[in-house]
Image: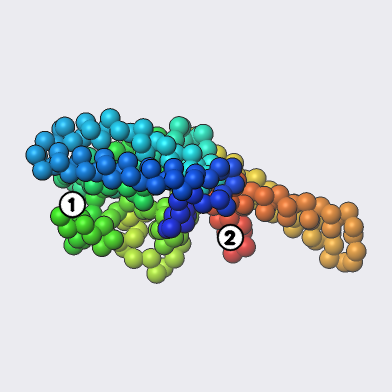
Amino acid sequence: MIYIDFEGKTPVDNNLPNWKPWSQEKWNAWLAKSAELLAELEKLSEVGDIKERNDFIDSKSAHWGKLKPWLQALSKGKCWFSEVRELYSYYDVEHFRPKKEAIDINGFKRDGYWWLAFDYSNFRLCGNVGNRKKGGWFPLKDTSYCSTYDLQCEESEECYLLDPTDLNDVALIAFNEEGNAIIVPDNEISEWDKQRVEVSIKRLKLNEHEALTEERKKIWQKVSQEIDLFLKSKSRCSNGGNPAAMGKMKEHARNIRKMSRSESELSSVAKWCVLFRNNC
C-alpha cells in the first residue's frame, strides 16, 4: 500500500509526470455531470427503488472511468493498494466506501454510500484482484458512527479497511523477507489498528495473491544483495583509498536508491529491507 496525497488534488493540476492536465472547463463539466447524476440518485432514493438506483449507478460507470488515467498518474502508474502495475491485474476505479451496499465484519449488509458514487474523493485505484475480493465489504468498529445520506459523517467513521489516502493507515503496514505484508513492528500499535491491518491484508488478498508475494520476495532479495555488495566494497576502502571499490560502492548505492524511489514497483518493500538490514 502506498500513500497518495489526495487532498486538494484535481485533474487540472499540471505538476504530475505523464499527465496532460484537464482544462478548468473540462473539470467543471465533469463536476457538473456528477451533480446531475447525484440528483437522479436522490430522486430514485426518495422513491425507494434500490434496485433501480443501483442499476442506474452501474450504467454510469463510464463517468468515473474518465478519471482512471489521472488516478494512475497520481501513483506513478501503480495500484494504490498493491504497489504494482500489471501483476495485480487490470485497474479498477474502486469506491473506497461502497456505492451500492456495505457489508459488515459478520457478513450482514446495509445500504451503501450511494451519494458518493460520483464523488471523486471516494475513488481509489485498485487492481481488480483486490477490488473483486473487497466488493461491498466495509465494516465499521462496533462503537463507530455510521454515515447516512441524511447524516453524512464519513470523517467520523472508524472503518476496518486501510485507506491509501491516509498516511497513518499506510504507516501501519510493513513487509518481511518472505514477501508478506505484515503489521508494522511497533509495540505502541493499538489492538484496533492491528485488527485493521490483518483484515485489510486478507480482504484485499495482499498476501494470498502468490505472484504478488513472490515479486515482493524478489525485490527484498535484490535489495539485500545490493546491500551485501555495498558493504563488501566499503570494507575494501577501510584501509585507505581504493578508487575501484569506491566506484562499486556508489554503483550499489544507486541501485538501492533506484528500487526505493516512489516510481519503482514495490518501493515500500525495498525501503523495509533497508530498514531491516540497518537494524540487524
Q: Secondary structure at mark 2?
A: helix
Give how far apart the Cα atoms at labels 2 and 1 are: 44 Å
Residue drawn at (17%, 58%) of the image: 151
Residue drawn at (45%, 54%) of the image: 9
Residue 275: which numbered mark, if any?
Answer: 2
Q: Amino acid at mark 2?
A: Leu
Is residue 96 visible in the rendered structure shown here?
no
Q: Amino acid at mark 1?
A: Tyr
Q: Is residue 238 above or below residue 210?
A: below
Q: Is residue 192 left or right of residue 40?
A: right
Give residue 124's position: percent from left, percent from top. 40, 45
Is residue 262 visible in the rendered structure shown here?
yes
Q: Which residue is mark 1?
A: 149
Q: Is residue 97 left or right of residue 29?
A: left
* Quarter of image, res 134: top left
Crowding around mark 2 (Cα neighbors within 10 Å: few <14, some 14 to 19, many 20+) is: few
Of 23 and 98, which appears nearest the observer? 23
Of 271 and 52, which appears nearest the observer? 52
> Looking at the image, which residue sits at the far front?
25
Q: Is residue 40 left or right of residue 177?
A: left
Report the label total. Answer: 2
> Looking at the image, which residue sits at the far left?
47
Viewport quadrant of the C terminus: bottom right
Residue drawn at (18%, 53%) of the image: 148
Give residue 193's position: percent from left, percent from top. 34, 60
